[in-house]
Image (cartoon, helix red, strand yellow):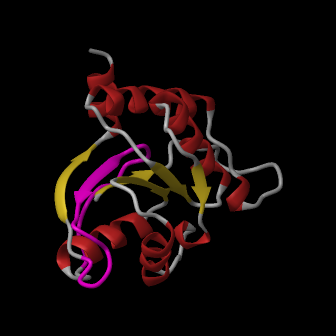
Amino acid sequence: MNLYLIRHAISEAESPSGEDSERELSDKGAKKMRQIAKGLRTLGVDFDIILTSPYLRAQQTAGILADVLKTKKKVVVSGNLAPGGNPDLLFAEINEKFSVDSLALVGHEPYLSTLVGILTAGGASVEMTFKKGGVCYLSTDNLLHAHQANLEWLLTPGILVAIGDH
């Protein structure tokens, strides 16, 4: 399985309601995410399904990815990708509901870095800078038991934008 962990794009500092979960992407964040998605398209990245956090900024990021990459299936919201989610429940959900070759997970920090640590280093803490709009690509045979994955690449938004501009 190709597994792409994607941090949501740049969002507004706060929502009108004051609820963190309702913060929207900023205009700059939405524009940059379109450029990032074009970079992924240039690299030949394709998703069967995009699984996203229920937070608005993550859902908007997932929508941009689906639009630019012409994702064949749909964007699916998962509470297991919300900040503070449970990785075991997320992996169980993926194994139970999604038999796909390529899956994108759109979420938040530090949860995404925690997932990388679980999948690549047996749960050890992994020091990494996961910028807003950054993408980490992991490959794995499955997520059933050992949760073992290989880190293929981690690309910053700037690199992806540059790739998309060519």
Main secondary structure found in the magenta portion: loop
Split into 4 quadrants, where in the image is the C terminus?
top left
Q: Residue at x 35, y 29 (%)?
A: 41
Which residue is nearer to you in this view: 6 or 12?
A: 6
Q: Return the x and y of residue 128 as percentages of the image width and height.
A: 25, 60
When the figure is inspected, residue 42 is found, relative to residue 117, above or below; the finding is above
The reply, left or right, for residue 15 in relation to residue 126 is right
Residue 145: within the magenta?
Answer: yes
With respect to residue 123, does 119 lie above or below?
above
Q: Residue 146 sits in which quadrant?
A: bottom left
Q: Position of residue 106 (x, y in %)?
A: 48, 54
Q: Which of the two residues, 32 or 145, is positioned nearer the viewer here?
A: 145
Residue 14 placement, left or right of 82: right
* Residue stretch rendered in magenta on the structure: 125-147
> Going 26% across and 25% down the picture, which residue do you hit?
163
Say which residue appears at 27% left-offset and 78% top-offset: 147
- Asked whether residue 97 is in view, the answer is yes
Residue at 61 percent across and 49 percent down: it is 59
Q: Is residue 110 visible?
A: no
Image coordinates of residue 48 in percent, x first then y, are 43, 47
Outermost residue toward the right in this view: 17
Give coordinates of residue 131: x percent, y percent. 37, 49
Viewport quadrant of the N terminus: bottom left
Relative horizontal placement of residue 114, taking residue 124 as reference (left or right) = right
Does residue 59 show up magenta in the picture?
no
Residue farthest toward the front in the current orientation of the protein: 99
